[in-house]
């Protein structure tokens, strides 16, 4: 093996090659070959972590806390360009700060002159991330970034940022694919590797257990987040064998796990981050209950005056460290459990839902814990009746779960189904088109959509972005779009095209959320194409004031009180 295979440059080039490869199996083969080429355990551990987790292991509790503005202004200074006039327009057009930084570093002479790319090893990258973790001031973080970037190629800088911020690498290759690559590289059964990753919580540790034939040594430990079981969206009328399912209301809250042992309680979000500090009253509640060692899967909801209130109000609690008395009183929260993953000394993922539910009900009755109400489904009419009641409560819809299903961690299959009503639709205009990857490589298949602000005194533009959509259209529609996009292109930023805003898209979404980091101050949850409105003019697009009105209407809507056919019960 040559030293170059252990460099961060080689990892970055492999990641880029994976991004440019269309077939999922081919992506996995590329990654497997890369893993096999790494000689030392340490290199393999770091490579798997960087590709599958981020700068630090998920179970370490560490984050390289560095904001987009910190590394973006640092990049603008490094390139000797104006942040407001040059960097921000490039970022907006490309839809990605890291993508913009890569393009600028590659094309601006001032940046190229500062860089003398070396052969930074994976261990050296780990040390840089550790340095960033240990400092707190923006100046110190930027000093470390400037020193590191001088030793990197633009491609390395892009992936260095993406790994550092623990977001997606945006190469069409998420953690489950890294798991598949490890199985392929070391000749292991993929389900066995996936199970070991789930119970250890560490992709780096999983990689070493694979390589050294020690998968059977993996043990589950409390206080590392487990991969959540996911539900497949479906229309209620298409459910087959409906009598095999139980139903629960789908709460308008935040999915979370609660890990409890003695006097220690930890809460984890769906993206596996520790959110304990944001919800001290939940911690206090569980500490009073004298529970055995358990892991609950459930939902954190704002609950006040006998109502589950909108998710938008829960956002006011998220991310706050040590929320004050005023916030706690105004937005009180409740953890409502609907599954049990660990009990006493044993993981129970392989038990059926019915068996897990029996244990959960016993705990609820003994320790007075709020848990969901479950309903045995009779027929499709019964599903519709339960669905309407869920909406009346202000909840998102209905969950259908097979009574005999095991806990399929990290999977989205048909054992759990979610029946939801779209949060709404907006007529938007296409502002930017982004080149696709995977099976849609070669087409512009990802789009930034905007709303109209031409008559809004707060803005000078005609349209501002409101969301990105990646699907919801047919291949035939995509081809027609791409043909029209060529005629409307006015700017090109690498893989992104700036367009004359003439194509109108009716966009469907699950919810509207406040997002102060965007120009609109709002973002859409799960936006997708409903239809391409070739018949509409851009002047027919919805406005920011329409978005604001829709948001407020959801906040203000009346909700059925929980004492009337409740969606959960709370033994007292």
Image: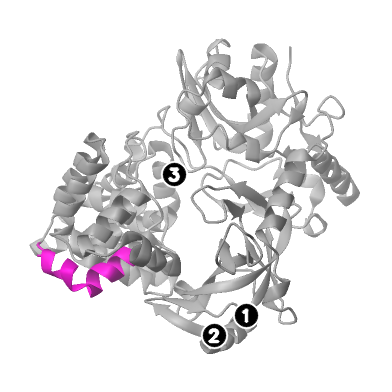
Name the mark nearer the viewer: 3 or 1: 1
Looking at the image, residue 95 sits to the left or right of residue 484; the answer is left
Looking at the image, residue 184 sits to the left or right of residue 43; the answer is right
Q: Which residues are magenta?
A: 99-118
Image coordinates of residue 305 in percent, x first then y, are 76, 23
Could you tell which of marks 1 and 2 lies nearer the N-terminus?
A: 2
Image position of 387 with respect to 265: above or below: below
Image coordinates of residue 240 in percent, x first then y, are 78, 56
Q: Are marks 1 and 2 in contact (CB under 8 Å)?
A: yes
**Magenta stretch: residue 109 in it?**
yes
**Within 10 Å of the Cα at label 1, are there few (<14), some (14-19), or many (20+) other Cα atoms?**
some
The residue indicated by pointer 3 is 195
The residue indicated by pointer 1 is 502
Is residue 399 something one can see in this rendering? no
Image position of 345 with respect to 397: above or below: above
Looking at the image, residue 111 sits to the left or right of residue 178; the answer is left
Q: Which mark is residue 488?
A: 2
Could you tell which of marks 3 and 2 lies nearer the N-terminus?
A: 3
Q: Could you tell me which quadrant the C terminus lies in?
A: top right
| Residue drawn at point x = 55 percent, y = 84 percent | 485
Picture quadrant of residue 535: bottom right
CA distance for labels 1 and 2: 8 Å
97 or 459: nearer the eye? 459
| Residue drawn at point x = 48 percent, y = 50 percent | 517
Q: Could you tell me which quadrant the N terminus lies in?
A: bottom left
**Magenta stretch: residue 113 in it?**
yes
Query: Predominant secondary structure in magenta?
Result: helix
50 or 188: nearer the eye? 50
């Amino acid at each position: 093996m040559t030293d170059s295979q252990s460099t961060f440059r080689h990892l970055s080039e492999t990641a880029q090659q994976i991004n440019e490869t269309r077939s999922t199996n081919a992506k996995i083969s590329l990654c497997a070959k890369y893993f096999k080429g790494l000689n030392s355990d340490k290199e393999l551990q770091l490579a798997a972590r960087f590709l599958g987790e981020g700068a630090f292991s998920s179970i370490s509790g560490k984050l390289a806390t560095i904001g987009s503005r910190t590394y973006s202004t640092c990049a603008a200074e490094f390139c000797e360009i104006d942040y407001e006039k040059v960097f921000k327009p490039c970022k907006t057009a490309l839809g990605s700060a890291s993508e913009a930084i890569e393009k600028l570093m590659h094309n601006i002479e001032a940046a190229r002159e500062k860089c003398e790319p070396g052969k930074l090893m994976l261990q050296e990258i780990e040390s840089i991330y550790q340095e960033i973790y240990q400092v707190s001031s923006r100046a110190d973080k930027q000093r470390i970034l400037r020193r590191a970037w001088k030793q990197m190629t633009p491609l390395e800088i892009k992936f260095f940022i993406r790994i550092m911020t623990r977001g997606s690498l945006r190469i069409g290759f998420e953690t489950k694919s890294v798991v598949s690559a490890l199985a392929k590289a070391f000749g292991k059964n993929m389900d066995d590797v996936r199970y070991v990753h789930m119970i250890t919580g560490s992709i780096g540790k999983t990689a070493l257990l694979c390589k050294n034939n020690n998968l059977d040594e993996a043990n589950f430990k409390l206080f590392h987040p487990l991969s959540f079981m996911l539900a497949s969206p479906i229309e209620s009328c298409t459910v087959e064998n409906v009598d095999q399912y139980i139903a629960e209301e789908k709460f308008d809250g935040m999915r979370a796990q609660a890990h409890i042992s003695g006097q220690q309680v930890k809460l984890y979000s769906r993206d596996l981050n520790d959110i304990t500090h944001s919800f001290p009253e939940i911690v206090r509640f569980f500490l009073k209950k004298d529970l055995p060692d358990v892991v609950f899967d459930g939902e954190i909801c704002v609950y006040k005056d006998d109502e589950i209130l909108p998710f938008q109000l829960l956002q006011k609690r998220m991310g706050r460290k040590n929320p004050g008395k005023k916030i706690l009183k105004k937005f009180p929260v409740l953890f409502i459990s609907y599954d049990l993953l660990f009990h006493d000394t044993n993981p129970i993922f392989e038990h059926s839902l019915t068996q897990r539910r029996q244990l959960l009900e016993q705990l609820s009755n003994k320790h007075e814990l709020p848990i969901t109400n479950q309903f045995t489904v009779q027929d499709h009419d019964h599903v519709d009746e339960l669905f309407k009641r869920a909406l009346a409560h202000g909840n998102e819809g209905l969950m259908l779960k097979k009574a005999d299903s095991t806990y399929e961690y990290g999977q989205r299959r048909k054992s759990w189904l979610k029946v939801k009503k779209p949060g709404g639709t907006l007529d938007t205009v296409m502002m930017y088109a982004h080149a696709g990857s995977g099976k849609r490589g070669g087409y512009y298949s990802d789009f930034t959509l905007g709303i109209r602000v031409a008559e809004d005194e707060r803005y000078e533009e005609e349209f501002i972005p409101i969301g990105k959509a990646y699907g919801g259209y047919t291949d035939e529609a995509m081809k027609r779009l791409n043909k029209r996009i060529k005629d409307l292109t006015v700017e090109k930023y690498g893989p992104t095209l700036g367009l004359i805003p003439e194509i109108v898209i009716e966009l469907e979404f699950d919810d509207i959320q406040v997002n102060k980091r965007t120009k609109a101050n709002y973002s859409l949850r799960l936006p997708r194409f409903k239809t391409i409105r070739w018949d509409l003019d851009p002047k027919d697009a919805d406005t920011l004031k329409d978005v604001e009105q829709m948001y407020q209407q959801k906040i203000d809507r009346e909700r059925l009180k929980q004492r009337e056919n409740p969606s959960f019960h709370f033994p007292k």
